[in-house]
Structure formats: structure tokens, C-alpha cells
Amino acid sequence: MSDETTREFSTVGVIGLGTMGAGIAEVFARNGFTVIGVEQNDAGVQRGREHLEHSTGRAVKREKMTPEQQAQLLGRITLTTDMADLAVADLVVEAVVESLEVKKSIFRALDDIVRPDAVLATNTSSLSVTEISTANAKPGRVVGVHFFNPAPVQNLVEIIRTVVTEPDVLADVQGLLRSLGKNPVVCGDKAGFIANTLLFGYLNHAVAMYEGKYASREDIDAAMRFGCGYPMGPLALLDLIGLDTAYEILDTMYKQGRDRLHAPAPILKQYVTAGLLGRKSGRGFYTYEAPDSPVVVADAQTPSVDDKPQLRHSIKLVGVVGTGTMASGIVEVFAKAGYDVLFTGRGQDKVDGVVATITKNFDKQIQRGRATEEQKSEVLGRVRGTTSLDDLKDVDIVVEAIAEDLAIKTTLFENLDEICKPGAILATTTSSLPIISMAKVTKRPQDVIGMHFFNPAAIMKLVEVVSTVATDEAVTETVLALCERVGKVAVKCGDRSGFIVNALLFPYLNDAVKMLEAHYATADDIDTAMKQGCALPMGPFELLDVVGNDVSLAIQKELYLEFREPGFSPAPLLEHLVTAGYLGRKTGRGFRDYSAR
């Protein structure tokens, strides 16, 4: 495409001056564009002016802008109630209420106002852009431009192309948004676009988990924050978004795609009907100090201090089976917390390797001034390795961290049952196998529990404490209290595939693969959308390549077998990559090629 065909944008119209519309107007004015803002009536114009003055006033207060720059910016914006004033606009962005009829009437009216070459955009977050474009005589010039709130701060913009959007319109809008310092990602016209489709499937799944009383709201939220590094837990995020908004988005997505995973969880509708809309109403999944307050206050569901888990079993000596990365990390965690640790490995070289790993970790910390030589020798003094399982006869709890293979683990549990003293707790770090299968080969199923540490165990804060139907409550309580003593955040759940974190994380990753497979958006655009639109530490494809596609596929298969949910069936593209040996970073190639880096 030659440069001559590229449109020049200098005047931008914005219809609707609520929070979002005013934010979009500010973005363009900040970048030197002439902006014409249109509202229905004088009251709307006044509200829009206040939004702009407040937002730019905050920037002045924070010294991100001088009072002169603020005056110049506001001087570039003309506010009006007459749509005919948009006749000079090169681009018009509509940001009114999420109503198809209202939006269509605007696009119909613009036909007689704007120039034939003007580009028309809708900021809808859930409605069909194609449907909106049909109201205009030239649907090829219509595109979706979904800004994220607050528009001046958030860099992500989803550009939605319909089947009739002209390629030069798409290219020009992409170029324009880049010139504003935004990161545009392009996708097809499907309810939810990229970020909401992937985000709301995950949020809805978290609601279903809570509704099924599988885990408490606090534990579900803590699991995703500490296990995945998410800035907010799913239920707290829903309260922030608004449960009514979430219900509408899920309902629209379900009606368009008929994916059962987008059918809003029934409890959402109950909350919305009861007026419990989240922060804005002062109550949703959590209770807030006042409407619109971010401060959570205790309510009937808040765990009381009196219910804090206690050590019901005396724990003095901790046993660990295994010498891999996970086992070494667990040994370090307990020893640092003041416990004597006895660990076993298959050979003396493996045993020595664990001590070497802990020593190396300490040396790094000492170099950075985060630990001392005395602390190192103290911790290493509490650690003892052995090659004989029989030496574990006196431990109070044993944590196994060996290969994820049920046959190997059950054999180990049969042995531990014979070796360990009565009353000793037997724990497994499995992330995907049924714990009850290990418990049933022992004569003490009441003492068997899951302690799912996250890698690297010495750094990651989360431990999922998994009870089976046979686990004694005193054992669960002891393990929860023990986790707290060693500085971990413990969450409690039942013995089913994926526990909390993997059950919420992997279907979301699988959905991202299906989105890529359908050529709906590129891997780069999907990663950008999730990192910038949802503030996640990594995009789904970056994360899959780190975790390993083989590991991800195995977990997804387990989830599919357990829940028999058609939406959980592993994406064929994931299976093809694993078959081809493209497992991610460890093989140099996964969704991306790392061999040349």
C-alpha cells in the first residue's frame, strides 16, 4: 500500500462523553488532535466537561502535565449537542450506552453528516460490530475500537474487523492508534473480543467453583494471586467490574457462541436480582465499607480469628522424599522455618545434590545481603540426607515430591505406611493425581493429605492443602497451621482434578489455544491483550511455553476426564505441537521459536 492512500486524521469526533467517551476525547486531544465531543443535552455536555477537567486536573496534581498543557489540551476539545458539527471529522468514535438500537440509530444518522471517506468506529465491548455497521450505507468504513478503562492510562486497544471492513481502513486505524502510543491488537467480530472472551470464561469458572462450595471466596482469590501472580483474585475482580456488567457480557457471549462455559453461573443472576452488584452497591461476593468503596469489611462469611488453624499434631521432625527441584525447595522451606528435616534420595550423589542446591541458594542470598553465613550454617545444620527410606521411622510428617506417576507414588505410600510411626502425617505434592488413590493403599487413609507447593517452592507463597473424603479434620487443620508457620499462604480444597489453580488456569490457556487455532487473532496479539488489558504477568502463550506444552496437555486431559466438560477438551493445536516435539522453551520451540534467541 503506497503512502498516498493513507488517510490524514486531524479532527476526531467522539459521541457520548461518559467516563469512557471523555477518556477517549482526552487521549486524542493529548496527542494534538482537534476533538469534537457530542452529547444528547446540555447536562450531558456539562458532565463530560467535568470528567475532562477532573482527569486532566489529576494529571496536573501529579505533575504529569503543566497547567498550560492542560489549558491547551482542553482548548482542542469543542463540546456540542449537535451531531451536524461532526461534518468536518476524519474519524468518529461512538461511546454511548451498550444498546444495539441506540448505536445503530447513531450510525444511520452519521450517513448524512460525515464525508464519504470518514472512518466510523464503535467502542462497544460486547455487541456485534457487524450488526452496528449495517446501519450505515458504507459498512466497509466501520470498525470496532475497544479502549480499556481508563482510556488515558490503559495502552491496550482492541481493533475489531468485520468481514466487510476495508483493509485500508483497518491499516489506517492501526497506524493512528500506534501514533497515540497505544498498543492495538486486531481480532474478528465475536462477542467478548480477545480479553473479555478469555477473562470472563475464567471468571465464570471461578464463580461456579465458589457456588459449588469447593473452596471459600478468600481461598479462590488467594490461590490465583499467590499461585499465578495475578493482581486480583477472580471474585474480587468481579466485584470491581460489577456483577450486572459481568452477567450481561457472559449472557451476550453465550447467546452468540453457545459455549456452555460462558453460560452465566446461576448465582450471578441471583446476586444481580438481589441488587448485590459488587463494589458499586457496597456488596457482591464481598462486603464493602460503603458503595463504591474498595475497603472490604468482615461479614458472615469472613473466617474469624478464633477459627485460625492450630497444630493438632505435634510436628518436630519433617521428612521429605525426593531430591529434585521441588523436593530441594521444600527441604529449604522447612529448615529455614526452624524445623529439623530428614530427606531421602536414591543415591548419595542425589542426596549431596540437595545440600549443594540449598548452599548455592544461600550463597546467592548472602551476596545480595539478604542472608548471613551464620544463617546458612544454622539452616544446613537442621538438614540431614539419607539413602534409606527406613530412616523416616520417627518423622512427624513426611512430604513426598517424586515423579508424577501414580504407580510409583502408590508403591511409596505402601512403604511409608509400614515405616512411619502411627499418627505421622503422609503428604503428597502431586499437582494432578487423585490423592485418595494413594491414601487407599495405606492402613491410615485419615492421615493422608495433599500439600501442593508451587515451583520454585522456596519463593512461591502458595500451598494448596487438599483433603480427601477420608482425611481427618485434625490432620487438615495441622497442615494448614504448619503452612502458616513456614511462611506460606495455604488454601483449602477437595481432592479433585486441578485443585483450585490448575482447574482455573488451564481451561483459560486451552481457550487461548482454540482462539489462535480459529485464526481469530495472532499469538502476539492475544498475549498483549491479556497482559495489558487484564494486567496479567504473562500472556497465555508465553506461559504455555514456560510450563511446557506436554505438561499443559497432560493437565488439560486430566481435567477433561474428570469433569467431562466438552469445553475442556484439549485444543487439537496443543496436541499437534506436543506430537511434533514443540514443547516450549525446554525444546527451543513451542508457540514461538526460541532456537535463534
Image (cartoon, rainbow, N blue to C red):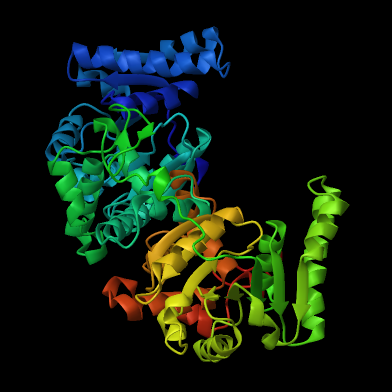
Query: What residue is drawn where x is 28% and y is 25%?
Result: 18
Rendered position, 485 above or below 83: below
* Image side of residue 71 versus residue 496, left or right: right
Picture coordinates of residue 35, whole percent (x, y): 37, 20
Residue nearest the observer in this picture, 36 or 152: 152
Q: Tell me if residue 59 can be seen.
A: yes
Residue nearest the observer in this picture, 551 or 10: 551
* Image side of residue 130 versus residue 509, left or right: left
Query: What residue is drawn where x is 49% and y is 56%?
Result: 310
Q: Quadrant of residue 565?
A: bottom left
Q: Quadrant of residue 563?
A: bottom left
Picture coordinates of residue 204, whole percent (x, y): 29, 56
Rendered position, 572 above or below 143: below
* Image side of residue 437 versus residue 367, left or right: left
Query: What residue is drawn where x is 71% and y is 57%?
Result: 336
Residue nearest the observer in this picture, 553 or 139: 553
Picture coordinates of residue 121, whole percent (x, y): 30, 38
Q: Tell me if residue 95 can be seen.
A: no
Rendered position, 382 above or below 310: below
Q: Quadrant of residue 353?
A: bottom right
Rendered position, 593 above or below 129: below
